[in-house]
Amino acid sequence: MRCHTFLSQCVQRGWLACFLIAAVHTIASAQTSDVAREKRFADEIISQLVVGEAVQIPVSGNKGYASFLGLLAEAANKSKPAIVLAHGVGTHPEEGLTGELRKRLHDLGYTTLAIQMPIAAKEAQVDDYFPKLFPEASARLDAAANWLKAKGYARPVLVSHTMGSWMANVYFDEQSKSTSYKAWVCISLTGGYSFATRNYPFPILDLYGENDIGVTVSSAWRRNGLLRLAFDGSQQVKVAGADAQWRGKEGEAAQQIDAFVKKCCPDRSWS
């Protein structure tokens, strides 16, 4: 709830102010994910994993970040782009909507890679995430795309949820011109996009629920207005009856993602 309150303040004050604050403080306050908590999550996930396999993804370069968990479910046919999934705040890639989507999209013929995003301690405040963990989040999103590229998936699609969507927006602001991602499905973004989003060189699907987080719903008009200026094929879809966690609506979310990807990224060889 603190996260939603903070993001609501960002909307009221404007994204630009928030990013300027981040730029000032990131160097001094950057930290790394709670590795011990990640390990507890990983141990729990791997012991019960049914669909796909657990992989470790390295972060290249001299960023000083540790490798991280990914849940890979590879499709037999590589004609479809692979899909990277980034979960919300304080959780893991097998929980909630992300865990459901990685399996449902795999059933629809996609290779999926759900990744562990950086997390803080269980009792963390919002400022333990923003901006402190956002540099590592960007590094992981980039590493996941590059890891898939090395496996033959040159242009994956990113699907992000809540805090993962905010992290993705910051990542793309920094690297939209050089990233390997072909498209972005942004689910339940709490607030509005950054101004730079309109210049991303790929289409965006803004997906949110009728009963989503209050500020997500109230800011939908703002996001839709920006998407009208964005890359061709960008669109917004509201799903009737869906809340922020998409309980009971996971299948519809998967169908909307599938329809968007088929339209913006027609099947072909992605190797």
Image (cartoon, grey):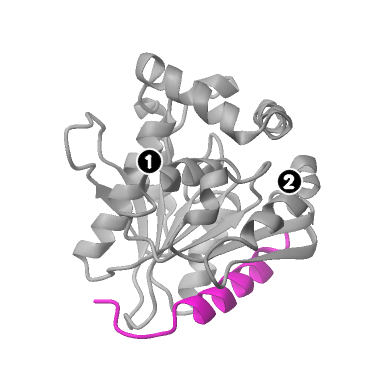
The residue under the point 48% across, 25% down is: 22
The residue under the point 40% across, 16% down is: 29
Q: Is residue 59 left or right of residue 127?
A: left
**Which is more toward the observer, 248 or 260?**
260
Q: Is 216 situated above or below 200? A: above
- Dot 1 or dot 2: first in sequence order is 1
**Which is more toward the observer, 103 or 85?**
85
SS for tag 2? helix
Classify 10 Å Cα crowding around label 2: few (below 14), some (14-19), many (20 and above): many
Position of residue 266 measured from the top left corner of the image (x, y, whole percent): 44, 83
Classify 10 Å Cα crowding around label 1: few (below 14), some (14-19), many (20 and above): many
Q: Is 86 situated above or below 239? A: above
In which image quadrant can residue 23 be found? top left
SS for tag 1? helix
Q: Which residues are magenta?
A: 247-271
Give the residue pinned by disc 2. Answer: 216
**Secondary structure mainly formed by the magenta segment:** helix
Position of residue 92 measured from the top left corner of the image (x, y, whole percent): 48, 43
Q: Is residue 260 left or right of residue 246?
A: left
Position of residue 217 measured from the top left corner of the image (x, y, whole percent): 78, 49
In which image quadrant can residue 104 be found? bottom right
Give the residue pinned by disc 1. Answer: 138
Q: Is residue 49 left or right of residue 59?
A: right
The residue under the point 50% across, 45% down is: 169
Q: Quadrant of the N terminus?
A: top right
Q: Is 264 situated above or below 72? A: below
Position of residue 114 measured from the top left corner of the image (x, y, whole percent): 42, 55
Asked if the residue under mark 2 is in contact with the one under mark 1, i.e. CB atoms within 8 Å, the reply is no
The residue under the point 72% across, 32% down is: 8
